[in-house]
Image (tube, grey):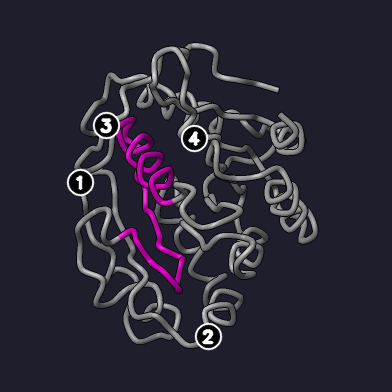
Amino acid sequence: MFMERGLRKGIANQQYNGFIVEQKPRSMVSEAYKKLRTNIQYSSFDKEIKTIVVTSAQAAEGKSTVSGNLALSFAQIDKKVVIVDCDLRKPSIHKNFKISNLVGLSEVITGQVALEDVVQKYNDNLYILPSGKIPPNPSEMLSSSAMAALIENLRDKYDIAILDSAPLKAVADAQILSVKVDGTILVIRAQRTNKESVIDAKNFLNKVGANIIGTVLNSVETIKEKSYYYYYYETSEESDRLAMK
């Protein structure tokens, strides 16, 4: 297990407008994202990790926040990054980045628009593909050959593609996407996610042969300093151990 050890103090419990890696780039949480970024870059010796699904066991665990901060962290080192809102049931990426969601992933998959016509530029290195209109059949759309082709297109056009997906215990969307990408990150919220949910989520991914490259435990509160920080667990086996603590 690899655990970030330099994050004991964390940051104060505050609300930020925007993403912390932008608003507080020298904070302990921003440093944790940098270490997470580095761990992802070196997580595979055989195959470069370019496409990543970020999911969680349940709703409201912070997966979209992790997705956004991680995307920005990669962009800060001059990687060309795209973040895709693949939560076609309850999208939030457009809200977090304050962009339009009139057209997006749904319209690209169904062939109504071209990818280059709907990807929105956030800064010099970061691009965003919002979800677009909520379809009646999200799972079918995400499992389509058009979605698989899109992921390959993103792999060619960008250095890193981060796919924000729906929670695992709610629907099968994250399972579907996890077999189409290079790696999957499971987000767990401290004091919220119980051990059964963590084990179930990991089992869901294992059943489809997903490459779980790590688990992010967020919103950990230290008793002494009432601050929050993030841990990154490097191996998939750690999800079970983490749940037992």
- Mark 3 or mark 4: which comes first in sequence? 3
Magenta-highlighted residues? 64-93
Contact between marks 2 and 4 (CB within 8 A): the answer is no
**Does residue 169 sit above or below 13 in this rendering?**
below
Alpha-carbon span between mark 2 and mark 1: 32 Å
- Mark 2 or mark 1: which comes first in sequence? 1
Contact between marks 2 and 1 (CB within 8 A): the answer is no
Q: Residues within 10 Å of mark 3 (few under 14, many from 20)?
A: few
Q: Amino acid at mark 3?
A: Gln
Q: Amino acid at mark 2?
A: Asn
Quadrant of the image containing the C terminus: top right
Q: How many marks?
A: 4
Q: Residues within 10 Å of mark 4 (few under 14, many from 20)?
A: many
Q: Residue at x 29, y 54 (%)?
A: 127
* Foreground tag (2 vs 1): 2
Q: Residue at x 56, y 60 (%)?
A: 167
Residue behind mark 3 = 14
Alpha-carbon span between mark 3 and mark 1: 25 Å
Q: Residue at x 36, y 40 (%)?
A: 69
Residue behind mark 2 = 137
- Mark 1 or mark 4: which comes first in sequence? 1
**Does residue 144 sit above or below 80 in this rendering?**
below
Residue behind mark 1 = 123
